[in-house]
Structure formats: C-alpha cells, structure tokens
Image (tube, rainbow, N blue to C red):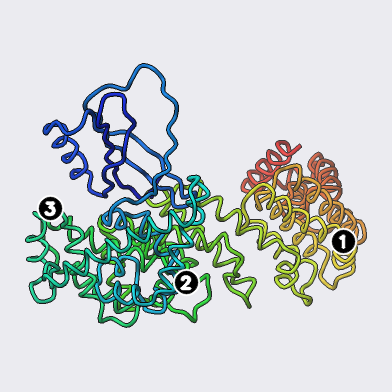
Amino acid sequence: MTGAQIHYELFIRRTPGAAWVLDMATENRALATKTAEEMMAAGKVAAVKVTKESLNPETREFQSIAIMTLGAAEPSKAKPVREDNEPLCFTPQDLYTVHARDRIGRLLEHWLDRRNATPFELLHRPDLVEELENSGTDLQHAIQKIAIPEAQARGKTVHELMRTFQGLVERAIERILKDSKKGNLPDVDKEGFAKAAERVSREPERAYLLGAGVAASIAPARTWPDKVIRLLDLADAAPVVGPPRGLALGVIEQPLAEILGSRAGLDELIGKDLDLGVRLAAMARLAAAGPVAALMKIEPAVAKIMPPETVATQRLAKWLATEDFQAVRVAIARRVLRELTGPRRLRPNDPTGEIETLRALAMALTAAAGSLVPLDEVQAAFVTRSKTLLTPDFVESYIGRDRSAKDEIEALMWLAENVIGAVNKRQAGRYLASAIGSLRFEKELRNGPDAPGVKLEVLAQLQRGVARGGLVPEDYGPLQAKIGDVGGQVEADAKVVTTLARGQSAPALRLLVLLRMAAGEISPIGPAADRARAEALKLIRQDETRNDLARAPERMGQVRQLMEQITKAA
C-alpha cells in the first residue's frame, strides 16, 4: 500500500449490541480520535471505533485498520450482517476527503478542464460553486452518473439516491456561500499566508478555511504553470515550524497533487509539444529529484533524455527534493507508470530513440522505486512497455531495410538486452533466431569481401553477444551453435587453421593465434575452434615450439592462460 491515500472514519454504537454507524470521515487522525474520546466521556454513545482507511490508487479499493476502540465490547452472539445501504457521504465535510475529491474530479472532468480548475478549487471557491449550481445540466449529470452505480450496489432506486446526493450538494453549496457572505473565509493575500495559517490552526474546520484562502489566492492564474508558481509562493511563505506549518503545507499539497496528477496540468507544466518519452523523463525527475540528479551525473543516457527545466519545474523540483509533498511525488510517479502501460509511443518517429529512452527511464525509476512506488510495480510497467517493442511493426521500423545481416543481428541483440520479462525475452530470442538462422546471414559471411580472419572475429563477437541479452541458455545456446557452424564454414572455405599451422611465422606466435581461436576470442566456439585446438595441441608438442617459448617467457604465460580457458570451456 505504498503511496496509498489515507483518511480516518469514526463509527459509533449508540446502544450495546447495536450496529456500527459512521459518524465522521476526516483526514485528520487527531481530530477523529479526540472526537471519539469526547463522545465516550460525554456518555452519548455505548462504544466508538476509529479506523484508518487506505485507498489503493490502482484498484480503487480501501484497506481498513481499526486504530481505536472504546466502550462496550463486541456482542458474543453472532448477528446477521446488516447491509450498508447508506450513501458514502453524509455531510458536506465528507466531500473534502481524498477519495471524494478524486470522484468529483472524474465526474466533472470536462467542466473543470474548461475552467482550468481542480476539485480542490471547486470545493473551496464560492464563485465556482455558484457557476456550477447555475449550470444546472452539468451538476445534474454528475449526480446522475454517481447515483446509478450506487443504486445498483446498494439496492436502492436511482431517484432515491439522486435526491440524497442532491440534498448533500445543496447543503455543501449553502455552507460555502454562507461562509463567504459572512466573511469567514480568510484572504491569505491580504492577511499573509503565515498569519492566516496560524490564526485558523486553532479552528475545528482549519483545513477547510485555509483551503478557501489558498483557492482564492490561485484563482487569478489562467494557466496550470501559473497556479503551480502561486502555490509554491504560498509554500515559501508558510509558517516556519509547528502545527501551522504542517497545516499550511498539507493544504497546499492537495491542489498541487491534483494539478500534477492530471494530464492537462502536468503536460502544460512540462511541455505539450514534447514526445511522451521526454515528458515521462521530466516527470521522473520531478518525482525523484535527488536520485535522478545523482544518476544523471554518472549515466549520460539519462541526462540525454531530460528536457530543459522551466522556472516552474525548477522551483517545484527543489520543493519535491525535500520531505514535504509526498502525495505530489506519488501522484507524479503513478502517472508515469500509467503512461508506461498505455499504448502511446515514447518516440513515435524514432525506434532507436524509443529503446534508448525506455532504458534511461528504467534506470531513473528503478533508482526512485521503494520510496514512491513498489519496485515490483515499476518492473511490471516496464514488462508491459517491453511488449510494444516486440510487435512486428515496431521491429520492422527499427531494423529497416538497408542493414546488413550482421548489423541486423547486433540491433536485435541490443533490443533483447533492453526488454524485460521472460515472455518478452523469449520473443526477442525468436527474432534473433530468425536472423541468425537465415540463409542471407550465412551467405553474407561466407561470400562477403572481408578477410576470413575478420569474418571469424565478427562471428566470435556475435556469439558472445547473444549470451549477454538476458536470454535463458535454452534460447541462446542454439543461436551460439548456429553462429559456430557458420564460423566452421568460413574457416573451411579459407582453410584458415591449416594455413596458420603451416605458416612461416615463429612457432610460438602461430600457437598463440591458434589458441586464441580455440578459446573463442578471435573465432566462434564450434568446428573452427575445435580444428584450431587440435592443431594447437600438435604444435605445442614440437621441440621447435617448446624452444621458441623458452626464449620468450611472456608468451609462455599467455599460452598457459589460454590453455586454462580452453580446458574450462571443454
């Protein structure tokens, strides 16, 4: 549940043995526990229970943990389960919780986007509330969209739930408009953000009141970057220490997380005209500024994909590098993972750049994993993205039509190195097998213009390369064997081993070349290496060779080392 959004619910039992009834939902743990204790002390209820509700952003499910239970014990006799047919929200305050704001954002997404506003602003700005109320249709459609699934889940009629939600919305609207008319909402620009936070920190509705002040302060901004800058200005002006600072930064974090968690807000902040891969790189730098900055110093590939920073992103990165705004960092990291698992290309017109970008993103997000999102979720996202690199269309555009067989195999080996997941590795192995087993590859190596020694060394490099792509031995073993067979044909065509064994150069020098062939350094392991080994063993038994090695002790050391390699390989 790393990165889960949390609130607290207070349940009461009015008489011993009665069912639990939800009395309050809040993001303030201290408020929930204090209210529970006060209700028990006043004798108003028989029992109270406070639970911690953690929302999983991916599954949208809650995990509930009881953190306080006071009063009458649970009845020993089992009672029939009472189905909860009550709506999720009871009071206007319930609309301000994390999960409620998230639902509001989805129900009114288009209406909010047209006004460059977040659910936080809608709940805290009287002008937006009045505009939504006067729109009629938008509000009615939103209520209907939430009432239909809730009615099915709770066994009630749609009209009944619509009336319930309509009444809740009317009470919420009445509340904020009433507070606005009475002058209860602070003007943080006029009063000063720090002073306003300190003043309202003693109020029961402190988060709501300060939120209204923050929403009014960022209201004049007409773009998302301007809103972010205004929010960071308020963060700079927050109280220095104590509960007022925690309140101030906690309130600012809500709209900031909503802006950066939305596609429109984050894209406008980073840059709309950038490829998706570049935008994701910028997001990763925001979510984990410290680890990514350190990685950029040692990995040029990571630094290469990072776009230039704007004034807003530079300021935001400094704030996100601190311990504050954890929810903002998590929102950005979650957005990156969602985009990775989507269908959009990272670099639509550059297949090679797409692989490079994915590789750099993998390094950046792996460095940031753990504190923001679990490592297994990061790996799962890259497994999903790796599948898109193995579709026939992508591979065809990546390989092109003008590559030689050797270049094509090297490109496919690099592709295999940069995909993860057992299924993806095996698919990459199939592409490699098709290229290595082709008649074109064999003909190109046997009939090409290069010297036989050059061809054998190229084959040796390819043979070692297929084992570095992360394929299992069952997949890369046959590929190495095929490359070895081609090497045997190249050697047989040119009689390389025979020519070396009977050459006019010094015996020790000929022996070293044959041993290097036998060890797979300058010739692929296979028939050619076997023939080189056999000739090397014959040559090393000759007195002329022994005498030559005795005169050159440094070559004797090289021979011993190569013989050990050959023995281990055998």
Q: Using the image, tell me which numbered label, if any, was put on residue 243.
A: 3
Q: Nearer the viewer, mark 2 or mark 3?
A: 3
- Compared with 66, 181 (above or below) is below
Which of disc 1 and disc 3 is earlier in sequence?
3
Residue displayed at 28% across by 81% down: 221
Q: Using the image, tell me which numbered label, if any, was put on residue 438.
A: 1
| Secondary structure under the numbered disc 1 in the rendered image | loop
> Label 1 vs label 2: CA separation?
40 Å
- Compared with 401, 208 (above or below) is above
| Structural crowding at the residue carrying mark 1, measured as other residues with C-alpha within 10 Å and reported as few (<14), some (14–19) or many (≥20) | few
| Secondary structure under the numbered disc 2 in the rendered image | helix
Q: What's the residue type where badge 3 is placed?
A: Pro
Front in this rendered view, residue 187 or 164? 164
Measured from the top left, where is residue 216 in percent x and y? 21, 74
Quadrant hosting residue 288: bottom left
Measured from the top left, where is residue 511 in percent x and y? 76, 49
Residue displayed at 67% across by 47% down: 422
Residue linked to disc 2: 279
Residue displayed at 77% across by 65% down: 454
Q: Residue furthest right?
A: 493
Q: What's the residue type where badge 2 is placed?
A: Arg
Left or right of 568 in this view: 25: left
Measured from the top left, where is residue 346 in percent x and y? 57, 70
Left or right of 405 in this view: 170: left
| Secondary structure under the numbered disc 3 in the rendered image | helix
Q: Quadrant of the N terminus?
A: top left
Front in this rendered view, residue 22 or 324? 22
